Image (cartoon, grey):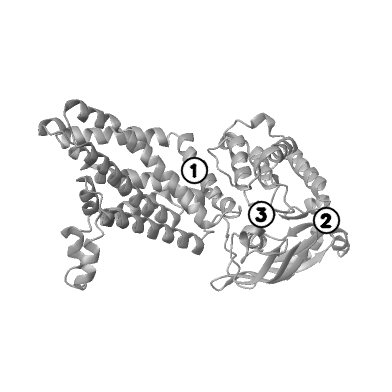
């Protein structure tokens, strides 16, 4: 369960996330949609406890992310935007490090390691140094890291960005396979992805929630019945809160 | 404690995953030797001690320690891995201490590898090994103090070169704070107790007294509090700006 209430993040006069509230239940795969700079990544960074909100609260699995960060972080798996990792480590050493931090031990640790390695097809590259891997493989290593402790809540920031169509398909199949009892939040600006994996979509622009519905119901709002027409219709009609363009928070 | 150890291990072995470890250790040993034998006149003095060796450690550290510390946090910021680290179930304190101890231990390994100096002086004469041991402790503590400064400054930027330059400047100030070069900046306008306090921060003075063979509790306390204070500052810097 993720409960977000009145979440706001300001950078000086600029409001990146403006008083948003929603909650996500187990079994939901939530697609977080919006144009670049809409506040998707900022919201995800606040859910995962990387950024402190200006005001408002986030509760994950019943733990307040600000007052009980360790408990909240323990039940989350997070793939940050761009899938950063320790590039000088081998894939195996990196995953062992994550398993250590997550406190996995014994046979459970071995079975979890085997599971993510098999699921993401990392067997052939285990001893390779991460920086020598292709972009697709690096993204898979990032996903493996997020899945390793079999978390109740998965936060994936643009999980298929930069992947080729086959890899995108694999990642979507993976997400579908896990979606039954988990909470998965995916940010994306690829609309077909929402159709393919999500059973709920939130459209966000200028830090505000503009729509929250199933992808089907959203698509039905346009006369054409297409999700991208709805997306454009909704996000183009709202005026930006300030004339300044949104600062890129992540890796500016 | 478990988390500190996990982060320590990752960080420590990451030095050896790149040529950094090799380059650092070779340059450190080479320069330490060159300074001791040529500038320090190790043979010419005809004395069985390692003073000409240890006397140049502060100056060696002034440039080599910032090279070690500059990557600690700036690199995490640059690559974005700080976001990964800070969303794992570890506290900022655990991350700061784990990474710092890894760098300090690495500096300790480089220092230990100077043992041929110790063998040489014992082969040639009959030195006071207690004093040599004390000087090693002093040198290690000084490296720790400089590293704590460097770790904190590295957390303040995503640019390793900026971290390096600022660390060299601040470390230079701390090394020489008992000397006119630094004190003249404060004398005249700052009250005398402040000037005295600044003078007492001098690394060279504290290192000097330990390396004479006297491990005084005050010197240990000095380095201990200094390291703790800079690590606390490191935590505060990270808490204040994690993202950019």
**Could you classify mark 3 by the number of other residues whose Cα lies within 10 Å: few (under 14), some (14-19), or many (20 or more)?**
many
**Could you classify mark 1 by the number of other residues whose Cα lies within 10 Å: few (under 14), some (14-19), or many (20 or more)?**
many
- Closer to us: B142 or A45: B142
> Mark 1 — residue?
B11
Residue under the image location 43 percent in, 51 percent down: B159
Determine the image quadrant of residue B135: top left
Q: Nearer the viewer, mark 3 or mark 2?
A: 3
Relative horizontal placement of residue A59, taking residue B136 as reference (left or right) = right
Residue under the image location 47 percent in, 48 percent down: B99
Provide residue A79's location: percent of width, then percent of height: 66, 50
Relative horizontal placement of residue B121, taking residue A51 as reference (left or right) = left
Secondary element at tag 2: loop
> Mark 3 — residue?
A74
Q: First in sequence: mark 3 or mark 2?
A: 2
Position of A15 relative to A2 (above/below): below
Total numbered labels:
3
> Mark 2 — residue?
A27
Secondary element at tag 3: helix
> Chain letter of disc 1?
B
Position of B208 relative to A130 (above/below): below
- Closer to us: A190 or B144: B144
Residues at marks 1 and 3, CA–CA distance in whole angstroms: 22 Å
Residue under the image location 24 percent in, 56 percent down: B202
Position of B54 relative to A64 (above/below): above
């Amino acid at each position: 369960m993720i409960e977000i209430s009145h979440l706001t993040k300001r950078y000086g006069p600029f409001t990146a996330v403006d008083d948003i509230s929603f909650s996500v239940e187990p079994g939901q795969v939530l697609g977080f949609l919006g144009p670049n700079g809409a506040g998707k990544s900022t919201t995800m960074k606040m859910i995962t406890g990387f950024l402190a909100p200006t005001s408002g609260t986030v509760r994950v699995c019943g733990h307040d992310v600000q007052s009980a960060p360790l408990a909240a972080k323990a039940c989350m798996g997070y793939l940050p935007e761009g899938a950063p990792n320790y590039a000088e480590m081998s894939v195996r050493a990196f995953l062992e490090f994550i398993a250590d931090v997550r406190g996995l031990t014994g046979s459970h640790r071995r079975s979890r390691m085997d599971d993510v390695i098999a699921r993401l097809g990392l067997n052939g590259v285990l001893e390779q140094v991460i920086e020598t891997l292709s972009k697709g493989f690096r993204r898979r290593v990032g996903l493996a890291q997020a899945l390793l402790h079999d978390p109740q809540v998965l936060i994936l920031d643009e999980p298929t960005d930069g992947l080729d169509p086959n890899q995108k398909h694999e990642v979507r199949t993976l997400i579908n396979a896990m979606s039954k009892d988990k909470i998965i939040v995916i940010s994306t600006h690829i609309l077909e992805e929402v159709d393919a994996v999500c059973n709920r979509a939130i459209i966000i622009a200028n830090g505000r929630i503009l729509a929250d519905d199933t992808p089907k119901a959203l698509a039905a709002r346009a006369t054409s019945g297409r999700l991208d027409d709805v997306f454009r219709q909704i996000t183009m009609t709202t005026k930006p809160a300030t004339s300044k363009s949104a600062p890129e928070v992540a890796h500016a | 404690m478990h988390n500190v150890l996990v982060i320590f291990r990752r960080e420590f072995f990451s030095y050896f995953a790149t040529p950094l470890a090799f380059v650092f250790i070779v340059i450190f040993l080479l320069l330490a030797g060159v300074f001791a034998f040529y500038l320090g006149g190790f043979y010419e003095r005809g004395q069985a001690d390692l003073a000409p060796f240890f006397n140049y450690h502060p100056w060696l550290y002034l440039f080599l320690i910032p090279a070690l510390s500059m990557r600690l946090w700036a690199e995490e910021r640059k690559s974005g891995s700080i976001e990964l680290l800070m969303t794992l179930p570890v506290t900022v304190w655990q991350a700061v201490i784990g990474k710092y101890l890894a760098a300090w231990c690495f500096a300790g390994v480089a220092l230990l590898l100077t043992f041929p100096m110790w063998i040489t002086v014992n082969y040639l004469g009959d030195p006071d090994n207690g004093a040599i041991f004390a000087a090693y402790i002093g040198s290690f503590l000084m490296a720790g103090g400089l590293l704590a400064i460097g770790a904190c400054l590295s957390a303040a930027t995503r640019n390793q070169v900026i971290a390096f330059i600022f660390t060299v400047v601040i470390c230079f100030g701390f090394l020489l704070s008992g000397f006119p070069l630094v004190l003249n900046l404060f004398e005249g306008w700052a009250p005398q107790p402040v000037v005295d306090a600044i003078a007492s921060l001098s690394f060279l003075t504290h290192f000097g007294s330990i390396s004479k063979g006297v491990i005084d509790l005050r010197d240990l306390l000095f380095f201990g509090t200094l390291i703790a204070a800079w690590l606390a500052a490191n935590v505060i810097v990270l808490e204040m700006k994690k993202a950019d």
